[in-house]
Structure formats: structure tokens, C-alpha cells
Image (cartoon, coloured by chain):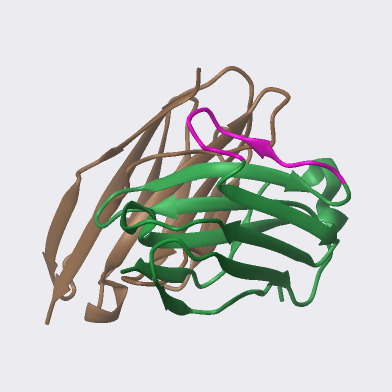
Amino acid sequence: GAVVSQHPSWVICKSGTSVKIECRSLDFQATTMFWYRQFPKQSLMLMATSNEGSKATYEQGVEKDKFLINHASLTLSTLTVTSAHPEDSSFYICSARDLALGDRGYEQYFGPGTRLTVT
Amino acid sequence: EDQVTQSPEALRLQEGESSSLNCSYTVSGLRGLFWYRQDPGKGPEFLFTLYSAGEEKEKERLKATLTKKESFLHITAPKPEDSATYLCAVVSGGSYIPTFGRGTSLIVHP
């Protein structure tokens, strides 16, 4: 149980184009989904938190117009990197919190990640 | 502000050599402490949640314990396949957003 998928697993795009990454909770409903960025040999950096049907909350320093997050349903969130540049190249990971746990649990279940390379 | 410090930063063990990873935390009102395993190029895999001091959880060769100031992840007789980065995270107060430590990179040599 508690499986989260991400698509694509890797993507190469040209500078100036946009890329969409999907995050799905496969066997549970996610009240909250999180998007992280991870640089080589570094820990996770939270980019934003999204709740179904409402606007995402972005962490300080994360450009919300560049990293568009949509949480259209309890099982799907998308991250769109707009006008991508080489410095956006990174490993993007989503995670989800199980709605059924409510206040009984705060663990997150992570997707496998998406490697983005902008050329 | 919550703080999570993991030590050591890196650990090399021989197969079968038991050891412990440390996660020290400073929070206001712990709601949960979490351990994750992350393999290179993959997302973190959930291992354990600990809620209160004195609590222990086990899974195969791993055992997680919790005090009021720190958590330990004990690895008994590790195998090469236990090699990974182990992440610790806490959730506290009224927030459900975790604070992660920087992780411990574990390498187990055959």
C-alpha cells in the first residue's frame, strides 16, 4: 500500500520550454501533496505544499510563476516548470500524505522522482 | 524553528558489523519522527514513524528508538543491500510539514 507514482521518470528539454511532471497516489487519497527538489548529495528541499482544490503554498525563495502546481484531485498533483533554464535541472520528488490518517499520522509517501535536464 | 541533525554524515561498515545512526532534534511539541531510506536516483522510502519517547519499532535488520531529544536507527548485522542514505524527519506543533535532516550515507562492504 501507499504507492506514489511520478511521470516521467526523466525528461530532457530545451531551454525556454515548459515541462509538466505528474504525481499520483495510486492506492490512497492524498489530502496534501508536497513537491521537493534535491541536488546531488544534498537533502530534500521543500518547494511547495498543495491541498486538493486550493492554491499551493510555496516556500520562501521558490518562484510560484515559474513552478506551477495544480492539485486537481485527491490523487493527482502536477508540477509545471515554465520557461525552463539549465539551472532548473534537478531531481524533483513529490510526496503525499494519506487522507485516511487524519491527525493520526503525518508520514509522507514519496514518488520515485523525476530527473529534469534542461539543455 | 525545528532543527534536525543527523550523525554521522557518512558511515562505512563491514557486512555483519552492527552500528547506529543518530538523529537529534529540537522541536516544540513533537507530533512524529520519521525515518526514510533513499537509494541513489530514487525517492525516499518510508521506514518508521515514532510518536513518543520510549517507543521502538523494528523491521528486519532495522530498529528505531526514540527519546525526548534524539532517535537512533540501529542496524543489526547489516548487508550490502542496506547501503543507502537514511533520512530522519520531524513534524511538530500545528504543522504537518516535516523538517528533514541532511541524512546519513551508509555503505556496507561485503
Residue drawn at the location 16% of the way across and 76% of the way down = B15
Q: Which of the two residues, B53 or A6, is positioned nearer the viewer here?
A: A6
Q: Which of the two residues, A72 or B105, is positioned nearer the viewer here?
A: A72
Residue drawn at the location 35% of the way across and 60% of the way down = A89
Residue drawn at the location 30% of the way across and 73% of the way down = B82
Q: Position of residue B58 (x, y in %)?
A: 51, 62
B65 is higher (above) or lower (below) than B60: above
From this viewpoint, is residue A14 visible? yes
A23 is higher (above) or lower (below) than B69: below
User: Is residue B70 in the magenta section?
Assistant: no
A111 is higher (above) or lower (below) than A107: below
Q: Position of residue A28 (x, y in %)?
A: 81, 69
Q: Is residue B20 left or right of residue B67?
A: left
Q: Is residue A39 left or right of residue B12?
A: right
Q: Main secondary structure of the magenta part?
A: loop
Q: Position of residue A70 (x, y in %)?
A: 75, 55
Q: Is residue B104 left or right of residue B55?
A: left
User: Is residue A55 in the magenta section?
Assistant: yes
From this viewpoint, is residue A30 visible? no
Question: Is the C terminus of chain B in the top left, top right, bottom left or bottom right quadrant?
Answer: bottom left
Q: Which of the two residues, A16 or B3, is positioned nearer the viewer here?
A: A16
Q: How many marks?
A: 0
Residue drawn at the location 53% of the way across and 21% of the way down = B27
Q: Which of the two residues, A90 or B66, is positioned nearer the viewer here?
A: A90
User: Which shade is chain B?
Assistant: brown
Which span of residues is magenta-colored? A54-64
Q: Is residue A49 left or right of residue A13?
A: right
Q: Position of residue A65 (x, y in %)?
A: 61, 42
User: Which shade is chain A?
Assistant: green
